[in-house]
Image (cartoon, rainbow, N blue to C red):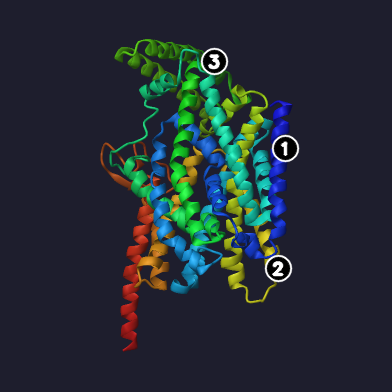
Amino acid sequence: MHWIDWLVLVAFLGYTIWDGTRHGKQSENIEGFFLANRSMPWWAMGLSVMATQASAITFIGTTGQAYVEDMRFVQIYLAVPFAMIILCLTLVPYFNKLQNFSAYEVLEERFGLSTRLFTSFLFLMSRGLGLGIIIAAPSYVLAILLDLPLSTTILIIGITATLYTMVGGISGVIRTDVKQMAVMMFGLGFCFYWIHYQLPPDVDFSDSLYLAGTLGKLDALDISFDISEKYNIWTGVFAALFLMLSYFGTDQSQVQRYLTAKSLNDARKSLLLSAYAKVPMQFFILLLGVMLYVFYIFGSAPITFHSTDPVAETEQTELAGEMLQQEYKATHLQRREAALNLLEQKTPENAEAFREADQHLKEVRESEMERQEKITESSRNDTNYILPYFILNEIPIGIIGLIVAGIFAAALSSIDSELNALATISIVDWYKRLDSKDRSAKWYLRSSRFTTVLWGLLATGAALALGETRSIIELVNKVGSYFYGSILGVFVLLLYVKRANGVGALTGLISGMVTVFFFDRLFEHPETGSWQLIFPWNETPEGFTKAIEYLWLNPVGTVVVVIVSVSISMLWDQMSDKSLR
């Protein structure tokens, strides 16, 4: 990377640390540190929520997802507007009325301390693991930029985010998020413009969409009902609704935003901002990945965007690699010619020739991936390296630094929010609630900052353990889906099931988590129709695939929690009545 780009990047990181830490003076107690004294404007909260959502996972993972597959991933965001409206009518006024620090404080009064602690523990587990993924995402970019091991870059990004979050508190988090959002949007917009600008002169935007559509890259809606499929309209509108309700309504990292609001109307407006903007923004990012695919139809692209170390190759695998490289170059040229022929004459025959050339190219890439897997004896993929490769090899000097800064902005805006939320739950729901001593405000403030550092180190360690993963955008939602449905079930009980008691709620919560685990490990054989439970420590038999995809775990968890809780509560009440007679 050119020294000008380095200067831009270093200046951005320096400004972010300064901007985040200078608000630390406003945090004289834990209400200032965690809730900014409930004084934040609605637009700042709304942009902060969007900045948290538009993480480095969004930049890197979503564009890579669209490049490798298609745009169907946008379907899981179709539920966002519905979820936001429901929350504005239900949980937002509930939280605003009680003026709590934590989303889980409200559970103790109704269901007892055990339910509150266990629910908050599930949050700590889910977001602690998810934060490791969020830290790992931008580390891919740093690893390419600095030519350093992934572990070193994970340490750099994790420690940087922890530093200013520890000092600035939620006020620093929200205010830096607003500025980081502007940098993110510039990066996205320029990448889209530059792809279009660099296409051949006789290929316009409509031609690009036509080529992408011919290959099925523009497929965004799938109306078939199949719970074994990751992305279809039913998954997006129904299953993902439970995920979004739980994430925006019961996840402390999101709830904490509208707990900082001046009023109920401000809290609602901050959520509605995301309701209107999230789906269009996600569609645009996916379209960027599709346009990137079209760009490499005409431009020179490597056989893989992240190759293995040549030192690890034997003479035989090296020879196989050279043969695949030659085949790839020839096929890439063939696909380019087929694309130009199709644009010149849009006939079914030319379209089929173009699709066949594209399929052949994919097969060559897959063969290279398999070759690298044999060399490294581990799973290999390049989904998370596609956008970084484009930025470093195609974007002009000076702008590279700004776009990479945008990816860093996306990463930091997600990491700081999660760290602050994890510290809030640790102090408010656990330490402060269980500590019998009367501590001073300064004591809890120091403890909050220490806890922020502790979670930052733990999350960085989780990122180091995670290493490289196939699709970071999918993985973060999979981690959440293990927990979100069951947590949402407890809040459904809180608001709508008056007969549920503490014993029922806790039993239902545990039952929901156990059920989700078993449903996630359920596999089926498409040909024989047989079903089988396969645990993580066992190998999946050949031909078996997931029977239920991860988004459906959310409604499963919610429904099980409600049914079991109601049943146990009724049984407990009956037993209590008998004992009183």
Q: What's the amino acid at mark 1? A: Ala
Q: Kindly identify the residue that appears in the image at 53 percent across and 40 percent down.
A: 57
**Percent of width and height locating residue 422:** 58, 57
The answer to whether the residue labelled 1 contacts the one labelled 3, judged by CB atoms less than 8 Å apart, is no
Question: Residue 491 occupies which quadrant of the picture?
Answer: bottom left
Q: CA distance from mark 2 to mark 3?
A: 64 Å
Query: Dot 1 corresponds to which residue?
Result: 11
Q: Would residue 465 be seen by someone viewing this image from the given angle?
A: no
Query: Dot 2 corresponds to which residue?
Result: 443
Which disc is residue 322 wearing?
3
Q: How many marks?
A: 3
Viewer-closest of 94 and 43 = 43
| Quadrant position of the C terminus in the picture | bottom left
Identify whether 4 is placed above or below 329: below
Question: Residue 351 occupies which quadrant of the picture?
Answer: top left
Q: What's the amino acid at mark 3? A: Glu
Viewer-closest of 298 and 355 = 298
SS assignment at label 3: helix
Viewer-closest of 170 and 131 = 170
Q: CA distance from mark 2 to mark 1?
A: 34 Å
Q: CA distance from mark 1 to mark 3?
A: 42 Å
* Mark 1 Cα shell of 10 Å, populated few (<14), some (14-19), many (≥20): few
